[in-house]
Amino acid sequence: MANYNTHDDPDYYQKRTKSLLQTDYPLSVLNIDFTISDSFVIHWHWHEDIELVYILEGQAYVTCEEEQILATPGDIVFINQAVRHFITPTNPEGCILRSVIVHPSFIFGFGQLEMEKKYITPVLHDASLKHLHITPKVSCYEAFRSPIEEIINQNEEKPIGFELISKASILHIWKELFSFVVENNPVPGKKIAAQDEQRVKQAILYIQEHYMESITLDDIADSILVSKSECCRCFKRTLNVTPFEYLMKYRILESTKKMHKKTLESISEIAGSVGFNNTSYYNKIFKKYMNCTPTEYRTSIKKDLPPLS
């Protein structure tokens, strides 16, 4: 379990997500202690990971977008992907909390598009589920508390198979979140969302199905029946990235999967299989998103592989 440290790096959260993805175990449990001297504030930020904040001692304000939540001991606050938030204790005595950070890819793994469409996308892009405050008074409380404590304990002690138990616990929590979406929508699994979010969801599905092809901004915009400029505005307002940036990042993540599965393919072959016609450009974009070159990434994978007997 990692301790939370103060930082001034504006790219801290983006780098943290990259680090989690590179470990192939995109889950982290942070110990955040506001009772120490010179206590600090977790400033406004957002990230691609989902977050579960569990208050152990004291009280904290968890502010998500424009709503301030008063969280007391035992409370759990779910913060959805790409939701701006910050956390601060309510008084000088401070508070202690655990923060479980999970990248959505950990739930099923990349590539399971039908499962993602059915269970992941409705939760991540539900406009009514930007955050959820779970207190001991609500009926579903135990369904959240038990698995989150299991995750904390497993990642602190790290027994054999702790990653499997953690994943099972996340699936239990995700089932509760998905149930919330179903119960708060007139049609099961259908999200209540702004027009931007609806369009971006459809565009993402198009990208996931055609990323290996030579697709353009025109193609992405045509898939949601809007102009190129409107398509860019939708992505910026919803995800704070352009359609092209999302496409590049998705291609890079897909290429890392291929490195794990197809160790005999060359870098140029992998680059071509995910839609890059130029290996030099692929190397440049890979380093931008993964903070290392494709060759360095592949070397790190080989070091972790067991020796052949």
Image (cartoon, helix red, strand yellow):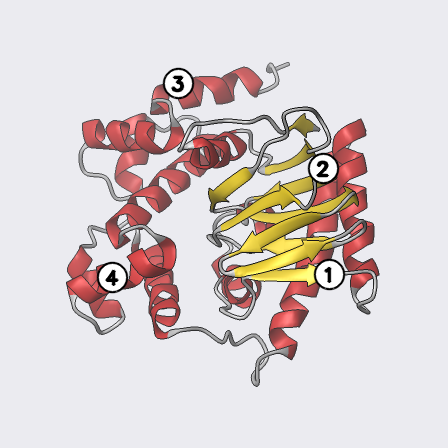
Asked if residue 160 shows in the view, the reply is no
- Circle 1: residue type: Ile
Cα–Cα gap, marks 2 and 3: 42 Å
- Circle 2: residue type: Gly
Q: Residue at x 56, y 74 (%)?
A: 189
Q: Nearer the viewer, residue 221 or 46?
A: 46
Direction from residue 107 to residue 233 in the image, left or right = left
Cα–Cα gap, marks 1 and 3: 43 Å
Q: Residue at x 74, y 33 (%)?
A: 155
N-terminal-most mark, 1 or 4: 1
Within-10-Å neighbours for mark 1: few <14, some 14–19, many 20+: many
**Corner quadrant of residue 233:** bottom left
Q: What label does residue 296 carry, if any?
A: 3
Q: Secondary structure at mark 1?
A: strand
Q: What label does residue 233 carry, if any?
A: 4
Q: Nearer the viewer, residue 146 or 221?
A: 146
Badge 1 vs badge 4, beta-carbon distance below 8 Å? no
Q: Height in image: 231 above or below 192? A: above
N-terminal-most mark, 1 or 3: 1
Q: What label does residue 94 carry, if any?
A: 2
N-terminal-most mark, 2 or 4: 2
Foreground mark, 2 or 3, reads 2
Residue at which label 1 appears: 134
Foreground mark, 4 or 3, reads 4
Q: Return the x and y of residue 112 as percentages of the image width and height.
A: 51, 55
Q: Return the x and y of residue 109 as percentages of the image width and height.
A: 55, 47
Within-10-Å neighbours for mark 3: few <14, some 14–19, many 20+: few
Q: Secondary structure at mark 4?
A: helix
- Circle 4: residue type: Arg
